[in-house]
Image (cartoon, coloured by chain):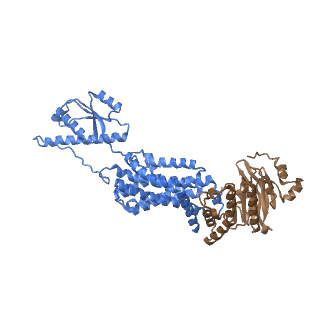
Amino acid sequence: MSDNLAIIATDLTKKFGDFVAVDAITFEVKKGEIFGFLGANGAGKTTAIKMLCGLSRPTSGQAIISGFDIYSQSELIKKNIGYMSQHFSLYQDMTIRENIRFYGGIYGLKSKDIKTRGSKLIQELELEDYADRFVGELPLGWKQKLAFSIAIIHNPGIVFLDEPTSGVDPITRRQFWNMIYKAAARGITVFVTTHYLEEAEYCNRVSIMVDGEMRDFDTPRELMKKYNKPTMNDVFLHMAVRSKRKGD
Amino acid sequence: MRILKFLLQKEFLQIFRNKAMLPIIFVLPVIQLVVLTYAADFELENISYVFVDNDHSQESENLMAQFNASKYFRNKGAKVDFNTGMEALDHNQATLLLRIPRGFAEKLQKEKKASLMLDVNSIDGQAATLSYSYASEIINDFSNNIVQKWNGLPNKVVLPVNVVSRYWFNEEMEYKNLMVPGILALLVTMVGMFLSAMNIVREKEIGTIEQINVTPINKVYFLIGKLTPFWVISIFELSFGLIIGKLIFDIPINGSLPLLYAYTSIYLLVILGIGLWISTLTDTQQQAMFLAWFFIVIFILMSGLFTPIENMPGWAQKLTWINPIAFYIKVIRAVLLKGSTFADIQMDFVIMSVFAVVVLTLATLSYKKRV
């Protein structure tokens, strides 16, 4: 049954002292699916994603990522996932090509593969003229697209994207989502957090987190029907209005 | 192992792209060596002194002439009595007060012995000790002259025991010879510790550490990748410093350089290990800088560089047993000045290796890919 599931999370919880950042969330993500992880600032999305990626140890609960256990096999998980964090995390004092070589290298790609995948990536992003420029000199939208491409350079089974489009203009956001569709078409499961609600409608299924709890998850269409709201935005507001935590 | 290649490539690219790096590597050593070596000179010259001569004899004049001839002393004039002499000490006009009592020459003539009084301003203990010993040397010379004069006379005089001391290993008592190896040790330590302490924490600050931690990279490789570039730079600093020391100060290199490099290699593992450890414990470069300073200042002040370890109280002497800088300064001086061989310093090798294992283990354990 779990063969076609990329992520199975059961009662996953993270506490910082008395504060319950993520409260027993349970969900599953199918292979090849684009799974939207919605929630206001401070709802616990980033904490949840960090547990799934093996950056943060859960306080309790279970999770299986690509068939590997989150507690005992986190280094195996890391081989099979890509991650793009909220902070831009390519090296700004290195060129595009140098960043590609470095990340390709530490994921253990062969030099030949680094070269071919790197050139293809640069070509697809139309960055040929900038390949030897420092990453720090690129505009934000380009940086985000580059970071995403590098996060999947080792062909992971799943990619985790933590607010990849925040602060990016609408055109670049559209292009970014085209890249997400392409990745999904290649069979990569996409786990994406966002607080742009129109983006939620691009996802196959979405979950909504409020105050560390997962309130619901389903296809956007079903959610709109269930709560009888015309847009995802209204669905989200309907749920989040009862939030006790103040967003920042 | 292939991963190391990519890590090193990245670290070296970033280090040499950092505009502050080249001055740190090339200018810092020159300034430290040249300025500190000249400034941290413990040799005392021109010690100012005043004197009270209550005897006004030929003998007292001879003694004063000998003081005046010495390059170490500068005569600040005669005082009428003890009180005015002490006033000069009080007002920092002089470091030393020499009193020749009334009847000095007569007593010397009749009883074959007489006393003088020396009062030393000992606020700076080290300077006081030196002034005192220089003054005693002159007075010894003076009494030797008298004894020799008597020897020509029929009265039989028993020669006092005569101590002839010779300063070994640094015969000319050149403070430069003592200071340059010590400052070299400082240089290697500071560059190594600061660069490594600032490094991982910098990746924490800019957020790239997360991207590293989410890869399957083995943290041991990651730390080796972080440590190696600074090890290379620090070894280079030692070589650069040795060349400057040789060219400008002509310091002696009596021992084997390969031996010194072998010891430095292990020592650097300790220093860089402490730096990396600091880097894993802190969240910002500012915190890392303060912690690194804390360790360096304590280690240096208790290392025997400026004050001999033998002068420290017992508990402080015991603390030097956990001070890697103290060991390193001892060894670098021993190899360069004494020409010590491996057999002489093998215990130091063992101790430093133990330090290295402990510190690197702590650094590796405290670096966690998952928090």
Q: Is residue B286 above or below residue B332?
A: above
Image: B51 above or below A188: above
Residue at the left extreme, as displayed? B154
- The x, y position of residue B258, in whole percent, is 40, 63
Q: Which residue is at a point 56% across and 58% down the rendered structure image?
A: B14
Identify the residue at image location x=38%, y=49%: B37
Residue at 35%, 33% in the rendered image: B92
Residue B116 falls in image quadrant:
top left
The answer to which of B30 and B342 lies nearer the viewer is B30
Q: Classify residue B362 as left or right of residue B143.
A: right
* Quadrant, the N terminus of chain A: bottom right
Of B359 and B252, nearer the camera is B252
Task: Tell me the brown chain.
Answer: A
Give the drawing colour for chain B.
blue
- Measuring from the top left, give residue B12's x and y in whole percent: 54, 61
In the rendered image, is residue B271 in sight? yes
Residue A53 x %, y %? 70, 60
Q: Residue furthest front?
A: A129
* Count of picture labels: 0
